[in-house]
Image (cartoon, grey):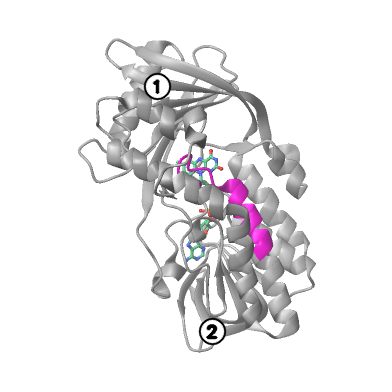
Amino acid sequence: MAQRLQCDILVVGAGPAGSWAAKRAAAEGLDVILIDSKPRIGERPHCGEFVPYQLFSEFGLDKNSIVNKISSLETWIVEDKAELKFKTHAIQSNGFLIDRPRFDRNLAREAAASGVLTMSSSTFLNFTDQSCIIKSVGAEIEVQAKYVIAADGAHSVIRKKLGVFTDDCIVGCQIEAPIANHVSNAMVFLDQDFLGGYGWLFPKGNTANVGVGMLPGHELTPAHALKEFSVMLTRIGLTKPGWLARTCGLIPGFGIRFPLFVENVLFCGDAAGLTHPITGAGIAQAIYSGDVAAEVAAKAVKSGKSSVLQQYHDLILYRYGRVFQHAISKKKLQLESWGNDNFTKLCDQTWISFKGYKKRERSS
Ligand SMILES: Cc1cc2nc3c(=O)[nH]c(=O)nc-3n(C[C@H](O)[C@H](O)[C@H](O)COP(=O)(O)OP(=O)(O)OC[C@H]3O[C@@H](n4cnc5c(N)ncnc54)[C@H](O)[C@@H]3O)c2cc1C
């Protein structure tokens, strides 16, 4: 017979959303279990590692994962790749490049220090009538939890098990490349070949995260697009040939995934589709949604009323509803007009750095 555990809250996934939610729920005095299928939490997330400046102060996060400060975001519209012709534009944009494995480990460590039972090599498998079945280091365990916080990422198994998964992801492929010349700005490359996405170069000292995020299922695969992109960066003189690390992952690309909760399960972070539909950034939203999910779940445990979970839906929509709806209208315009002649004009209308982005689309 399977071993049994009981808790107030089971958090599935120890990425930023899950670890933060677990820590917050424990701070509310709840009995919390946090599980992650990885043998070592934080190893090795797929990530450009660029976060907004306010993130650390808003949540009082440990700053020892900051690698360098970014103060400007350059946008390069690729007008002719063969001739290396670009239209460039820079705006002030304060942020940090972080060491993401260290960032995730810090959060998980803080959760454990707050009294959370943290279990690595432990995978959520399924629901039974009363409990969750997890597999921990080869053995099945039945966990009886009053509430479950599903922070299991873009590919959320929990959404699938509950029949509320939509396949809405773009693919992000990235290498860590050696830098040829000192670069201190974050750079974004808008290229017709990167369907519904973009390329990036985020510098961190002697290396940079170089990646491409785009819709899959077309002739040019994201991995191939990345290869061509990195060759182009070397031709411009920004990077040296070769790479030190390589990764590929999914990014929810079409906004908030509804429902945000089902019965006693709340979805947060990527599992809730909280990556920005145009930029793909999701770390800040993961932490905020983990925070709110924990707060609302704690209220539900303490009051014994599951009806309070509606507050989670309302708070997430209050913070992100309008911003995401606007971004989605821009994404729709992108996809309708991609491949038309005037790519520069489309970038002006749909990329966040340009004035045209602020203009409302008629359908939104
Ligand atoms: C290539 C790429 C680059 C990106 N760059 C940036 C960037 O520069 N800035 C930014 O803000 N965002 C970026 N993002 C998005 C960002 O990484 C995510 O939004 C963020 O990681 C979401 O956090 P999360 O906690 O919701 O999910 P995740 O970080 O994905 O964590 C989910 C966790 O759940 C675990 N898990 C999954 N299934 C199970 C299961 N069945 N049982 C137990 N555990 C499970 C996983 O092991 C994982 O640790 C990027 C994404 C990609 C793919």
The magenta region covers: 276-292
Q: Choose between 216 and 192: the one closer to the eye.
A: 192
Where residue 51 sits: x, y (%)? 61, 38
Of residues 80 and 224, the one nearer the viewer is: 80
Residue assigned mark 1: 77
Give the SS element for disc 2: loop
Labels 2 and 1: the sequence-earlier one: 1
The circle on residue 227 is: none
Disc 2 target residue: 131
In percent of the image, x 52 and y 68: which residue is there? 137
Disc 2/disc 1 C-alpha distance (Å): 51 Å
User: Any atom of ligand 1 within 8 Å of the CB at mark 1?
Assistant: no
The residue shown at (68%, 67%) is 294
- Specify whether 288 is left or right of 214: right
Q: For the residue with label 2, is its CB less than 8 Å from the closest atom of ligand 1?
A: no
Q: Quadrant of residue 196?
A: top left
- Three-letter code for the amino acid on which mark 1 is drawn: Ile
Number of residue marks: 2
How crowded pointer 2 is (Cα within 10 Å; few <14, some 14-19, many 20+) is rated as: some
Which amino acid, by three-letter code, is at mark 2? Ser
Q: Is residue 266 above or below residue 86?
A: below
Residue 31 seen from this side: no
Dot 1, how many residues are within 10 Å of its Cα: few (below 14), some (14-19), or many (20+)?
A: many
**Residue at 59% across, 44% down:** 101
**Splitting the image into 4 quarters, where does residue 49 fall?**
top right
Picture coordinates of residue 73 (x, y %)? 56, 25
Residue 194 covered by magenta stretch:
no
Residue 268 position within the rendered picture, expressed as x and y whole percent measured from the top left: 56, 61
